[in-house]
Image (cartoon, rainbow, N blue to C red):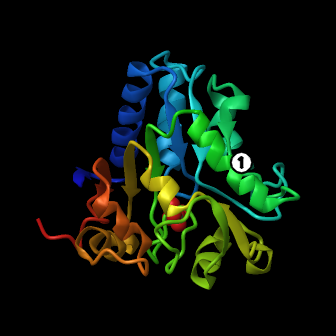
Amino acid sequence: MNIIKAENYKDMSQLAAQKLINQVNEKPDSVLGLATGSTPEGLYKEIIQAYKEGNVSFKDVTTFNLDEYVGLTKDNNQSYHYYMHHLLFDHIDINSGQANLPNGDASDLQEECSQYDNAIQQAGGVDIQILGIGLNGHIGFNEPGTPFSIQTHIVDLDESTRQANARFFDSIDNVPFQAITMGIDSIMQSKGIILLVSGSQKAEALAKLVNGPVTEDFPASILQEHANVTIIADQDALSELSE
Ligand code: PGA
């Protein structure tokens, strides 16, 4: 694993943006895997700025997001569809038909999962997947105990994940109990992975990811077995890793 030390959140976001911009400039029809949550918000701001300055175009890019809550409509302002449009897609020249998220409101969720994996395959696979990490080691919404062999699927969210994400909702009662997520196997098939980590509250999780045993009890640990992972972490997040 390649670990890049960022000074702070802004530096982390800029370093990640530059990597994605280089990828798209080198391969204009890149397939990007995108993530939601607080961590990539700065990355998306940097990308929008670079687009507005004419440094990159997304007109031939295809994207696949990691996950979506089950039961929220696309226009619900807590859905990841809403997040992605609001924080990125509406501000760049991506073709909205090529910006994919799982549909958590599909009538047949199993069918939605297999169609999502097929669509990724048909697009040629993900060139670079952006990831965050949950306090419990989840990547996407693959909670501890998820088999490493699994592709896109429906998950029951951990109570700790519901609590961590309650800050985005009016009340924890409104946080969905389930999500649809790319599986660990789907994520591991990406050609490259960039994992972003910021803040001291993630320091223990990052240390476990890098130095802990590879175990389904800590899903992110599987990244030790991927050939092309870059971790971009700020100083606070790196505080429990030795030099
Ligand atoms: P966060 O979420 O970026 O909001 O901390 C990351 C995650 O839970 O995967």
Give the residue at mark 1: 115
Question: Is residue 157 shown to the viewer in this render?
Answer: yes
User: Quick one: SS at disc 1?
Assistant: helix
**CB of mark 1 near ligand 1 (< 8 Å):** no
In the image, farthest residue toward the left: 243
Q: Is residue 78 left or right of residue 73?
A: left
| Quarter of the image where the C terminus is located | bottom left
Query: Residue 176 vs residue 108: left or right?
Result: left
Quadrant assignment, res 64: top right
Looking at the rendered structure, the kind of residue marked 1 is Gln
Residue 39 in sight from this viewpoint: no
Residue shown at 39%/28% (left/top)? 23
Q: Position of residue 182 (x, y in %)?
A: 58, 57
Residue at (62% x, 26% y) in the render: 92
**Pick the front one: 191 or 168:** 191
Can you tell which quarter of the image residue 241 is in? Answer: bottom left
Q: Residue furthest bottom?
A: 159
Label count reads: 1
Q: Residue at x 63, y 22 (%)?
A: 93
